[in-house]
Structures are given as C-alpha cells and as structure tokens.
Image (cartoon, rainbow, N blue to C red):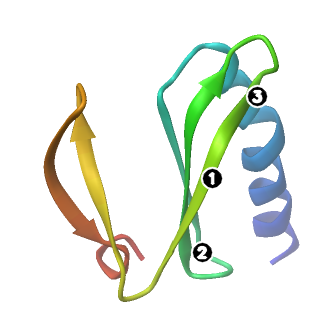
Amino acid sequence: MAERVLALQRDRTLKQRIYAKAGVPVYWILNLSDRQLEVFTQPNIPKEIYEQNLIFREGESVKITLKGEEIGAILVNDLL
C-alpha cells in the first residue's frame, strides 16, 4: 500500500512536471487507491504544470480526443 501511495505522489509531481514541460497535451493518472481517473490538460511549459485537472470517478466516462476531435469515450470502470 505504501508503494502505491509513493507511486501516486511521484505521478502527481515528478512525472507531471516532465510531461507538462514536454508539452504533452493530456496526462492521465489512473488512481487505483481512490478508484478514479485524474486527467490533466493545458500544459504550461515554462511553469512545468498543467493548468486544468479533472477527476472522473466510477460510473463516469471520459471523452477521448485526438487532434481536437472527439473520437469516443471510455468508462472509468473499464479502466479500473
């Protein structure tokens, strides 16, 4: 359990900064401890952060977008 918490913390800090700095438009964290999907968008490259963070819980779906076009959706339950 402690390893999972440390991994989640690393995903929210170090990895998130790396992806934001690289300009990755969307970064997902599948948070198994809280059974939710954390979606980060709008990277701010100079600040190395994402400007927007959305949380999707069990029973909700998240839109899948490719090059600005919605191509489908996936249920959080299917990811968990």
Q: CA distance from mark 2 to mark 1?
A: 17 Å
**Front of the two marks 3 and 1:** 1
**Front of the two marks 2 and 3:** 3
Q: CA distance from mark 3 to mark 1?
A: 14 Å
Residue occupied by mark 3 = 17
Residue occupied by mark 2 = 32
Amino acid type of disc 3?
Answer: Arg
Name the residue rendered at 81%, 34% in the picture.
Answer: 14
The C terminus sits in image quarter: bottom left
Residue occupied by mark 1 = 53
Of the pair 53 and 20, the residue shown nearer to us: 53
User: Label 3's element?
Assistant: helix
Please report whichever mark, 3 or 1, sits nearer to the chain's N-terminal start: 3
Q: Residues within 10 Å of mark 3 (few under 14, many from 20)?
A: many
Amino acid type of disc 1?
Answer: Asn
Amino acid type of disc 2?
Answer: Leu
Q: Is residue 10 left or right of residue 19?
A: right
**Horizontal and vertical percent for residue 78?**
29, 76
Q: CA distance from mark 2 to mark 3?
A: 21 Å
